[in-house]
Amino acid sequence: MTSPLQVSNKKAETMAKVLIVDDSQIYRFKLRKLVETKGHEALTANNGEEALQLAREEQPDIILMDIVMPGMSGYEAKRSLARDPATTHIPVIFVSSRSADSDRLWGMRLGAAGYVTKPVNPDQLDSAIDGIVAA
């Protein structure tokens, strides 16, 4: 019989619900696999409009957002999320092929919690997500 005072060796991890927003099916799949491999729950959206709806309904802990998408850009979606009282608290990490310093600066000025460039370095993405989950 196990004593209630015995401590489990199993590491307790905080799992996050992560919304992945990218118009590329390939990148949604890659990011989903990276997120799920770390034990997080992954939701996906194909564009900014869908992301806004899912963010309101699902209340994810983190949003991984592409910038260049048809219709509403990631920058526009981030501004809309920030203006909506139901979603303003959700941190956004931009995940983009745009790697210029000006793009990174603009993303951070919009209030992004992080900026990861494509092709995604899994360790960099893990670090960005872990920084938010631990906060």
Image (tube, rainbow, N blue to C red):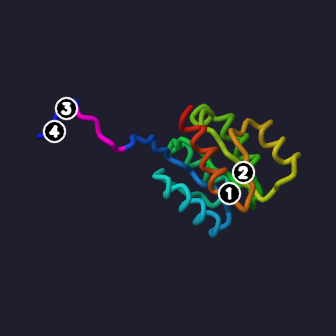
Q: Are marks 2 and 1 in contact (CB under 8 Å)?
A: yes
The C terminus - image quarter: top right
Residue 60 picture location, percent across and down? 53, 44
Say how many tags the image has: 4
As drawn, the residue found furthest toward the bottom would be: 26
Marks 4 and 2, the one that precedes in the sequence: 4
Closer-to-camera residue (116/85): 116
Q: Secondary structure at mark 3?
A: loop
The residue that label 1 is drawn on is 121
Closer-to-camera residue (49/20): 20
Q: Secondary structure at mark 4?
A: loop
Amino acid under label 4? Answer: Thr
Residue 132 picture location, percent across and down? 59, 38
Residue 99 picture location, percent across and down? 83, 54
Q: Are marks 4 and 2 in contact (CB under 8 Å)?
A: no
The residue that label 4 is drawn on is 2
Marks 4 and 1, the one that precedes in the sequence: 4
Residue 56 picture location, percent across and down? 55, 42
Q: Which mark is residue 116?
A: 2
| Residue under the image location 72 percent in, 62 percent down | 119
Q: Are marks 2 and 3 in contact (CB under 8 Å)?
A: no
Marks 2 and 3, the one that precedes in the sequence: 3
Amino acid under label 1? Answer: Asn
Q: Which residues are magenta?
A: 6-10
Q: Are marks 4 and 1 in contact (CB under 8 Å)?
A: no
| Mark-to-mark CA distance, 2 and 3 | 43 Å
Give the quarter of the image for residue 1. top left
- Whether residue 7 is in magenta: the answer is yes
> Which circle, 2 or 3, is nearer the viewer?
3
The residue that label 3 is drawn on is 4
